[in-house]
Amino acid sequence: MDAPVSATRSMARGALAMMVSQGVTWSATLVLTLYMPRALGAAGYGRLQFVLSLISIFALFIELGATTLITRVDQIGATARALPPI
């Protein structure tokens, strides 16, 4: 059998994986930032940014109330399951 992985080694492996993934993210962002405007043109890139800004605005409003709503619905469902039908 293999020996259990120590907590330090596990944390180091996780930290390395996060650093590598962050590097990939930054590299992809740099490449796409340089490539997308040229590939889409001014009008296409403007449309893309407009859609992304709308998504960001809607996401903001969803985040303001979604957590509370999900918690309330979950509590209502738990209460309904706990009470016997009349």
Image: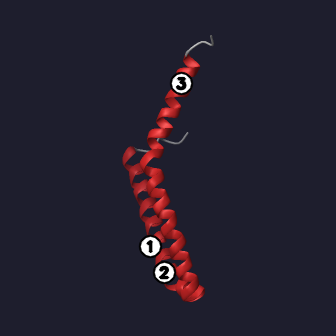
Label 1 and label 2: CA atoms lie apart by 10 Å
Q: What residue sits 54% from the left and 88% below the top?
A: 42
Which mark's residue is nearer the viewer, 3 or 2?
3
The picture places residue 74, in percent across and down from the top left corner, at 52, 32
Q: Is residue 70 above or below residue 55?
A: above
Asked whether disc 3 touches disc 1, contact meaning CB atoms under 8 Å apart, the reply is no
Q: Amino acid at mark 1?
A: Trp
Report the residue marked by disc 2.
33
Q: What residue sits 56% from the left and 15% below the top?
A: 83
The picture places residue 5, in percent across and down from the top left corner, at 45, 44
Indicate the secondary structure of the residue bearing disc 3: helix
Q: Is residue 55 above or below residue 73?
A: below
Foreground of the two, 69 or 34: 69
Tell me the crowding category of disc 2: few under 14, some 14 to 19, or many 20 or more residues within 10 angstroms, Cα based: few
Task: Answer with the quarter of the image where residue 60 lies.
Answer: bottom left
Q: Is residue 55 above or below residue 29?
A: above
Q: Amino acid at mark 3?
A: Ala
Report the residue marked by disc 1.
26
Which mark's residue is nearer the viewer, 1 or 2?
2
Label drawn at residue 78: 3
Q: Earlier in the sequence, mark 3 or mark 1?
A: 1
Asked whether disc 1 touches disc 2, contact meaning CB atoms under 8 Å apart, the reply is no
Which mark's residue is nearer the viewer, 3 or 1?
3
The picture places residue 44, in percent across and down from the top left corner, at 58, 83
Indicate the secondary structure of the residue bearing disc 1: helix
Tell me the crowding category of disc 1: few under 14, some 14 to 19, or many 20 or more residues within 10 angstroms, Cα based: few
Foreground of the two, 52 or 32: 52
Asked whether disc 3 touches disc 2, contact meaning CB atoms under 8 Å apart, the reply is no
Q: Earlier in the sequence, mark 3 or mark 2?
A: 2
Foreground of the two, 86 or 13: 86
